[in-house]
Image: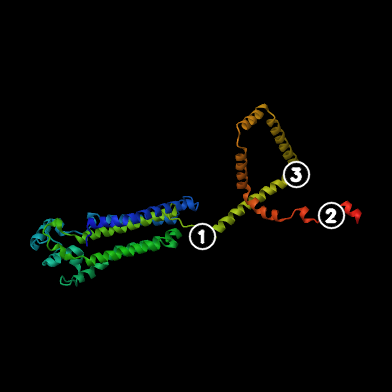
Amino acid sequence: MAIDWGTIKSLLIFFGPLLLPKAISYYRSIRAAPHLHNLKVAPLSPSLVRAIAILSAVVLIFLLRILPIFSPENIFTVTQSRLQIPTEVLFNRLSSLRPLHTLTPFDLALKNKFASLESRLLYLQFGPDVLGNCPFCNSDDPTSYLYYAIPSIMTPHVFNLVVITLVTSNLFSGSKAAAWRTPATISAVVLTVLDLYFTSSFNHQVNSARLRLPDLDLFFWTSRLLRFISLAVLDLVLAGVIYLTGTNRAFVTPPSPVERIETVMRGLGNIKGKLNAAGVVKNTVTRDEGLRGRSNAYWGHEVRLTREMMEEEEVVRGMNDALENRLDIKALERDAEEYTKGVLGGLMAFNAGPVSAIPSPAAATPATPTMEHQKED
C-alpha cells in the first residue's frame, strides 16, 4: 500500500499548476472577505474561547498518546530480535528485561501465540493487545483479529467525533462554530474509514521474507502514530478556523438582507435623533430673545471680520499671486462641488425629482391679458 516518491512527484507535477492558482485565489478571497463586508476584527466570545480550549486539550491528549511511554511495547524492538528468532530465545531475552526476570501473564499468553510465524505476522499488523487478549481469534482466520481490533481502532475516532459535535454545537459555541460542523464531521468520518480500510487491506505476509529487524513493516505502531497525529491535526485545524471565523479575520459570512436592513434602519434612526436634537436647539435659540441676539451678534461679527480680512494688503496680494500663477479655479470648483455632493448628496437626490417636477409659477399661471387687450375689449 506504500506510495513511492516518483508517483507523488508525478501527481504534484500534473495537479500542481491546476490547483496552486486556485488555492492562492481562494486564500486571497477569504483574507479579503472582512474588508469587502466592512467587518472589523472582533474579540472571541466566551463560548468560542471555551470551544478552542477543549480542542486544544484534546490535541494535547492525542500528542501525549504518541509518546513511547504510552505506546504498546513491541517485543521485537525491545529485545532487538529478528522475526524468525526461536520463541524460547525471544522470551528469555524479554524476561531479562523484566523485574525479577519473570514474565507477566500477558507475556505468557503471547508466548503461546508465537509458536507460528503467522501469529507473529499478525502481531505486527494488529498489535500485542489483539493477539494476546482475543479469546476467539485464530491465526488460520486473520479476519477474526480484524473484528476484535475494530473497537480499539474506532475508539479515538468516536471520542474525537463526540468532541467535534460538542464544540460545533450551536447551543454550546454559537453559530460561527456551528458553521464548521458539517466539514469537520465529514473529515472525521473520512479518517475513520481510511483507518479501517488500510488496516483491513494491509498484507501481513510482506514481513515473512524480511530477515532484518529494520526491514520489518511495523504496521500497528505506524498506523497508531498516524492515527493520533491525523486526529490532532484535524482538531488543530478546526480550532484555527473557529478562531479566524470568530474574530472576523477570515471565512466571513456576509450578513443577510434582513440584517443589513436592520443595520441601515438603526443608523437612520440615530441620524433622525441627532437631527431632531439639532432642530430643538435651533428652535430654542430662535425663540429666545437673548440667545437670538447673541447668535445675530456672533454672525455679524464674523461677517465684519471676514470683510476686514479680505481688505488687508497681504490677502489681496496673495489672491493676485494666485491668479497670476493661473490657479486652476475650475478644478477647485469641481472639488468643492464633489465635496458638497458628498455631504448633501442624499438630500440633493431626494429633492431633485420633486423640485424639477413642480412647474414654475410663470408656467403654471395662465397668461393674464395686458392693459392694451383690456382696452380693446
- Residue 11, given in percent of the width and then of the height, sits at 28, 57
Mark 1 or mark 3, earlier in chain? 1
Q: CA distance from mark 2 to mark 3?
A: 45 Å
Secondary structure under the numbered disc 2 in the rendered image: loop
According to the image, label 3 marks what residue? Answer: 288
Q: State the quadrant of the N terminus.
A: bottom left
- Apparent side of residue 375 relative to residue 362 in the rendered image (left or right): right
Q: Quadrant of residue 161?
A: bottom left
Q: CA distance from mark 1 to mark 2?
A: 60 Å
Q: Is residue 189 above or below residue 33?
A: below
Q: Nearer the viewer, mark 1 or mark 2?
A: 2
Which mark is drawn over residue 238? none
Q: Nearer the viewer, residue 204 or 316?
A: 316
Mark 2 or mark 3, earlier in chain? 3
Q: Is residue 238 visible?
A: yes
Q: CA distance from mark 1 to mark 3?
A: 48 Å
According to the image, label 2 marks what residue? Answer: 368
